[in-house]
Amino acid sequence: MGMKVKVSRKAHFNAAHRLYSPEWDNAKNAEVFGKCSNPNFHGHNYELIVSVSGEIDEQTGFVMDMKILKELIKDKVEDALDHKNLNVEVPEFKEVNPTAENIAVVIWNKLRPHIASNKELEVVLYETPRNFVTYAG
């Protein structure tokens, strides 16, 4: 058969962050990161689209059971990131700047081990309605 289909699930979470480099002083951080370098942090309503691509299972008709995908996103992403200060409360960002790019990679890495290896995984993360990043491993 061999039809490849992409299925997607939307989710969202709210989180605070500050973008800065510890190697730079506040002036240089402000120059590079602008408002996002506010030392008191600021928040975003992140929108997330998680897509899994692969062949349709002949018995179920699914690429992946969306109930399972929904639970995975809740367990691995929403519970880990929602209403958190990313810099302070999320271990992955202790040493890594929580840019949209890096958050997308962290989300992908959290989900990848739980999705069949013969399926492709793609994460699209909207930091604002107009700014979004895509990571597919």
Image (cartoon, grey):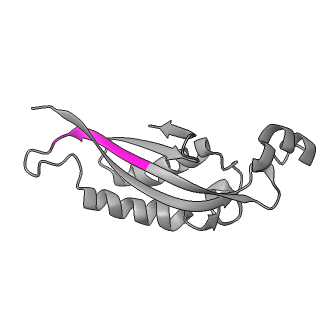
Residue that extends furthest to the front in the rendered view of this protein: 129
Q: Is residue 91 above or below residue 59?
A: below
Residue 88 on the magenta span = no
Magenta range is 49-56
Residue 38 image position (x, y, % from top left) = 81, 54
Tell me what residue is drawn at x 54 percent, y 54 percent: 46
Residue 59 appears at what percent x and percent y?
A: 7, 50
Q: Position of residue 15 (x, y in %)?
A: 61, 61
In this rendering, position of residue 27 left or right of residue 45? right
Would you place residue 24 above or below residue 90 in this image? above
Left or right, 55 with reference to 108: left
Please state which of residues 103 and 96 is positioned toward the viewer in this rendering: 103
The part of the image, by quadrant, that contains residue 14 is: bottom right
Q: Position of residue 99 (x, y in %)?
A: 65, 45
Which quadrant is the N terminus positioned in? top left
Is 52 part of what is drawn in magenta? yes
Direction top: furthest residue: 2
Residue in view at x 88 percent, y 43 percent: 24
Which secondary structure class fits the magenta region best?
A: strand
* Residue 1 appearing in the image: yes
Please give the name of the residue rendered at 35% of the width and 44% of the height, measured from the top-left corner. Answer: 51
Q: Is residue 20 visible?
A: no
